[in-house]
Image (spheres, coloured by chain):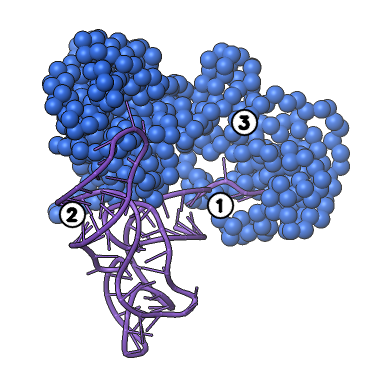
Chain colours: A blue, B purple
Amino acid sequence: MRLTRFLMPTLKEDPSEAETISHKLLLRGGFIRKVASGIYNFLPLGFRSLKKIENIVREEMNRAGALEILMPLVQPAELWKETGRWDAYGKELLRFKDRKEHDFCLGPTHEEVVTDLVRKEVKSYRQLPLILYQIAQKFRDEIRPRFGLLRGREFIMKDAYSFDADVKGLEKSYELMYETYERIFKKCGLRFRAVEAHTGAIGGDVSHEFMVLAETGEDTISICEHCGYASNIELTPAISSESYPVEAPKPLEKVYTPGVRSAEDVAKFLGFPLAKITKTLIYIVEEREPIAVVLRGDHELNEVKLDKALEGRPFRMAKEEEILALIGAHPGFLGPRGLKIKIFVDRALVNFPNFVIGANEDEYHYLNANLGDTFQATLIADLRKAKEGDLCPNCGKPLSFTKGIEVGHIFKLGTKYSSAMKATFLDRDGQEKPFVMGCYGIGVSRLLSATVEQNHDKDGIIFPWALAPFQVALLPLNREFIDKAEVLYYKLNSRWEVLLDDRDERPGVKFKDMDLVGIPLQVILGKAFQEKGEFEIKVRRTGERILVTEERLEEVISKKAEELQREL
RNA sequence: CGGGGUGUAGCUCAGUUUGGGAGAGCACUGGCUUCGGGAGCCAGGGGCCGGAGGUUCAAAUCCUCUCACCCCGACCA
């Protein structure tokens, strides 16, 4: 491609709309432009990288025997009503009506549509296992789209769905996809980690997320360096390394604690460590039943764990007015003693001697509360977030925590959708059975951002070879060298994807632009060419510069290309 | 949804406090010089100052309403 015939509108300054590195660099490099909040154009450069990712995904999915299809973005409400998700899916599901007043939505995911397809077209166990996938647009009306492609509303996703005759088959399909995902992310040249994860709105019981390790990640993952255990913190069991001293229960004592609201305030006021204070949170379950959740002051509630404890019944935090009406005290002075509602207690309070609770009366707390004595728990469970210092649930060694960007997620769905939608086949034994399903997603456009988050320096993007929009940039630094560069361009372009910077620009401009957009190899016609007829090859990632004669040029390029591919 | 912020040229922004000429740098067009890390000079083109309404002799600037975008939060007891 000749740059004068290409559209690569680079920017010298960071656009004011961008905050994160990948967002800034993708805008500055002319890869993407915003159309509306969370909705983007892909310009030629961005489109090329996106297609690279898609092709890697496609190649590996096909290799695993999955079949590519294409499903619609617009989906009828009827299908979503069959599974109950028309009501259960939150506002992220963009619903609308057509001219006949029929309900539709933009597909945030395609379980319903694919299950409908398969129940109509697949009737026999002989046709199983079956894995269907597509690479297509999705729309999720996110509360807060942010960071450019990292959390967009419209985005490109690869979603795959497996259909098996039984759980054993699902295990195999799941394992196959797990391995396929590892191959895909490895091929993309990313540092990533597979972790155990929460299943969320998709459902099912087992799932793994594939996390690209990067500081800007929205997820926290816990990792055990010792045994290899890794999970999303939402799922990590909280196993404390502390043990409580044996201490006789002391008599309950009411104390005046004026104006202290947070657990921190209480601790400071009483001169106790934060860990000695407890906090009592009030939640409303299914919009009617209030419950209390009691945690240590230095612990945080993990709502995914609460969700599990509530067996999936929807809940939300109580509003201040509701708390006042129910208990007669303001938040900050709440405690489990004397409450007439269900009390969920985090297991860290077991054997925890003589702690502080709110008195359910403004400006008062109790000292020396003890679980089972001062109050009774309806349920004792692991409800808190794991934190620094906690131990691996697998081997007992300390966990470490790191940030990640979720680029892939695989689920064992079981028969959740096939049962709801009566998607069945005839098994070998003549019995009609629901398909046993799995689903497997990759955020293709997010992967582009994640790549940039992980591969950049002060000058711009450093693309892994496999994802670079072009592999070689050809830079004639002087007008007189352009003819020579044209000849070279024809030659190199037959082996690599070459971008010829044939603009009448000064050298500095060309260097800056090519560094910014992250093309892995630059072939420069400059001083050395003028003086000795030699070409300079610059490796974007390492900054290494090599002078070569024309005879050796292609040989050295392919050697460097190989090195770059191997590294990753 | 709550809180904060921003909308002025393609981009980054000044001007708004205290009402009166729509500006700068970069980008773009033409010319000359320059040519290994975002050049210099000269001459140009480009604006519904986010939108609507109001106050005023006069509004980018003051008032009201609205729209869009960005950031933080939605675990606070």
Q: Quadrant of residue A244?
A: top right
Q: How far, Cα to Cα, is label 3 from label 1? A: 26 Å
Mark 1 lies on residue: A318
The residue at the point 34 percent across, 44 percent down is A12
Residue A387 badge: 3
Residue A101 badge: 2
SS for tag 2? loop
Q: Is the Cβ of the residue at disc 1 closer than 8 Å to that at disc 2?
A: no
The residue at the point 29 percent across, 50 percent down is A36
> Which dot, 3 or 2, sits closer to the camera?
3
SS for tag 3? loop
Q: Earlier in the sequence, mark 3 or mark 2?
A: 2
Q: Chain of mark 1?
A: A
Question: Which three-letter amino acid code belongs to the residue tagged 2?
Answer: Glu
Q: Is residue A157 placed above or below A360 in the rendered structure?
A: above
Between A382 and A561, the residue placed more toward the observer is A561
Q: Earlier in the sequence, mark 1 or mark 2?
A: 2
Residue A292 visible in the picture: yes
Between A179 and A470, the residue placed more toward the observer is A470
Between A26 and B37, the residue placed more toward the observer is B37
Residue A447 visible in the picture: no
Q: Is residue A250 placed above or below A451 in the rendered structure?
A: below
